[in-house]
Amino acid sequence: MRPLLLAAGSVPVLAFAMPALAATPAEVVDTYASLAQAAYDDSLSAARDLQSAVESFLSAPSPERLSSARAAWIAARVPYPQTEVFRFGNPVVDDWEGKVNAWPLDEGLIDYVDPSYGGATDENALAALNVIGNPTLTIGGQAVDASEITPALLADTLDQADGVESNVARGYHAVEFLLWGQDLNGHGPGAGDRPWTDYAQGAECTNGNCERRAAYLRAATQLLVDDLDWMTGQWAEGGSARAAVTANPEAGLGAMVKGMGSLSYGELAGERMRLGLMLNDPEEEQDCFSDNTPNSHYYDGLGIQNVYLGRYVRTDGSVVEGPLLRDLVAATDPALDAEITAKLAASVAALGEVKAAAEGGLAYDAMLEAGNAEGERLISAAVDALVDQTHSFERAIGALGLGAIAFEGSDSLDSPDAVFQ
């Protein structure tokens, strides 16, 4: 039985004529696959809107059109984080995810940077390669012709060059850097402030290589659209990701719980939030050029809740929903279901407080500063809520009879002393 698509503005209801708690594992996993397909489809649509805004800007650069392109990037970061819960437990997604959302990145690989950024390091000889500024490159001792910046150059030659993970040449954050530039404000207010004239033609061009910079932005945006189009297809009927979870419903349930627990604990609570707070480092924020990090964190948390409640609100306001995981948990342990449901609401609310504080003027950079008591309180409350709900997810593994499932960890939570070694 397929989840139904409810019209925008309709009252959210369970879209199946069946008694409560009558869901089967196969139906729940089918809902899960349909939620994934809808969320990736929304991400693809938003990326195409971003591409249109980028093309409009590049065709006639201006402050207003740069602002519109930035707004389109921010809008694209609403549906995509809600897909991240599908990454863990689904190898098809995990093997692909680095193409679109890898971070942190050494931005000096791509373009000019402030002198304070430095140059090559022992860890990354290409940290200041500046592809935009150099049509001829040397990578791994081999000469590379970069006279034409194309999607193929980014994907096949530059991304993860020399086997270094921070050599990120594509994806959301490469596009983000090209639209905002470096955020040089430290813990102070303000995001990156790349001038629109970095893309101007003729005498108005600033920082050189404006045509090559435009070519890079166009290529990176095209890759983002292509990659999201591919992943959307993997969750459609006949797609490999859908087939992998629906062929074995018990394994599909395991992927659902692993995704919820791993994103909640090791990835979001640990690597993306607790680690930055421990290091008091403004660079330890995922959307670091645009200062959009609190929004991405919030929608990550919402994505976890979506999977448990079997419900996703699409960008157009319509709803995809169906038999839900909580039905299966409630069938064996009603108290645990009530506990998980309440804890999910609490974690989303805590992440919402971080988001609201940022919208009110307390930037995430400032929250990470040593001695910022309010920032520490907000981030710590969200981390604690995410960790707390993960403990309940661990109990759900037993309630569902799924056997051993290990969630992703983080030194910031599991071995704090190792962070400083």
Image (cartoon, rainbow, N blue to C red):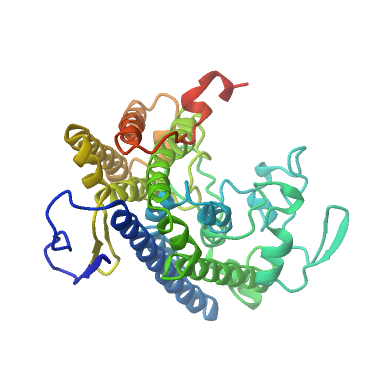
Q: Nearer the viewer, residue 160 or 236?
A: 236
Q: Is residue 80 above or below residue 410?
A: below
Q: Is residue 306 left or right of residue 294?
A: left
Q: Quadrant of residue 215?
A: bottom right
Residue 22, percent from left and from top: 18, 52
- Looking at the picture, does residue 147 appear above or below residue 108? below
Rendered location of residue 359, percent (x, y): 30, 48
Q: Using the rendered image of the protein, determine whether residue 66 is visible from the camera's viewpoint.
A: yes
Q: Residue furthest top?
A: 417
Query: Which residue occupies the foreground of this view, 134 or 391?
Result: 391
The number of discs equals 0
Where's the N terminus, which quadrant? bottom left
**Quarter placement of the C terminus:** top right
Q: Please say whether residue 132 is visible from this viewpoint.
A: no
- Is residue 119 left or right of 363 when viewed as pictured? right
Q: Residue at x 44, y 36 (%)?
A: 405
Along the line of sight, the residue nearer the viewer: 243 or 306: 243
Residue at the limit of the structure toward the bottom, as seen here: 59
Residue 159: percent from left, percent from top: 68, 57
